[in-house]
Amino acid sequence: MMKFFSEVYAQNNASQLSKTAKLRQLVRNEGGMKAGRVVIRTACQYGRRTCQRIEKWVIGRSFDWFYGVDTYGLIPLGRLDITSDNLVHGNLYGPVVPRIFNSMMSELHIPDREFVFVDYGSGKGRALLLAAWHPFKRILGVEFSKELHDVAVKNVATFRRTAGVGTNVECVWSDAAKFRLPDDPVVLYMYNPFGEAVMQGVIDSLCHSWHAHPRTIVVLYRNPTCGHLFERTPLFSPVSRTQHYSIYTTPSHAQLAHAG
C-alpha cells in the first residue's frame, strides 16, 4: 500500500510546478475569485481520481488474494508477444472493477441460462470469473495474446477450486475479429479491447451472425470509446448509457414476432 501512495505522490509531484505556474497566470488574468473556483474544482476531480485508483488497487489485490488468482495490473500490448495483424489496433489489458461489472449485470433482464456469455479481449480472465457467479449456459473468453490466455486458463482452474464455480468457463486463444459467435443468444462483454478499425469489423460480423440466426445479442461495452459505431448500426438499440459503460441489444424474439 505504501508503494502505491509513493507512486501516486511521485506522479503528481512531477507536474506540480507546471500547475503552480498555470495557477499564477490564472490569478493574474482572471482574478482570485475564478482562480479559487478552479482550485476547488480541480481538488474535487483529483480526489475522485485518487479514490478510483485506490479502489482498483485494493479491490483488485484483495480479489486476487482471496481466490488465489492473478488478474490485477495494467499491461501494454507492446510487452506481449502477439503475432496478430490487429496488434496495432489493440488496447492495453486492464481488469474490470467488480462493482462496475456487477452494475452492468444488474441491468440485464434476461434468462441467463439461455445465454452464452462471451468476453472479447478477455485478458487474464477477471470478467470470466465474475460472470461465473451467474448461471449462463456457457462462458467464453476470447484473447489474442497467448501469454494472457495462458494466465486466464490457470486463473479459471484455480477459481474452480477456490470459489466452487466456473465449470462452464472456457478460454479461447483467438483473434476476436476472426472468432465465430455461437448461434445461441449471447451476452457480449468488451472492456474497450480495440479501436475503430477492428470494432467496425466485429460489428459487421455480429450483424452477419444475427441475420443468419436471429436471436438476442446484448453488448456490454465498458469504456465505450467506439460506442458511436453501435449507435449508427440500425440492428442495435441503446439500453443504457453511464459514465462507465453502454449497453446495446438486438431485437428480442418477442419483438421479432410482434413485428412479423
Image (spheres, rainbow, N blue to C red):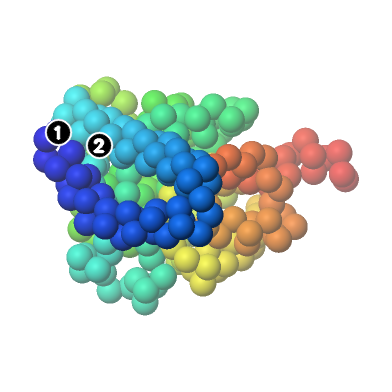
Q: Residue 45 falls in which quadrant of the image?
A: top left
Residue 51 appearing in the image: yes
What residue appears at the point 34 percent right and 59 percent down from the top-left corner?
Answer: 21
Q: CA distance from mark 2 to mark 1?
A: 9 Å
Local secondary structure at mark 1: loop
Compared to residue 256, the image places residue 113 above or below, namely above
Return the x and y of residue 52 as percentages of the image width and height: 36, 37
- From the viewer's perspective, is 164 left or right of 226? left
Return the x and y of residue 42 as percentages of the image width and height: 43, 44
Residue 97 appearing in the image: no
Residue lying farthest left? 3
Return the x and y of residue 183 as percentages of the image width and height: 57, 49
Q: Residues within 10 Å of mark 1 (few under 14, many from 20)?
A: few
Q: Residues within 10 Å of mark 2 (few under 14, many from 20)?
A: some
Residue on which the image places disc 1: 1
**Circles 2, 1 touching at the beta carbon (< 8 Å):** yes
Compared to residue 210, the image places residue 44 above or below, namely above
Choose between 103 and 141: the one closer to the eye.
103
Q: Residue 155 falls in which quadrant of the image?
A: top left
Rendered image: mark on residue 57: 2
Choose between 233 and 150: the one closer to the eye.
233
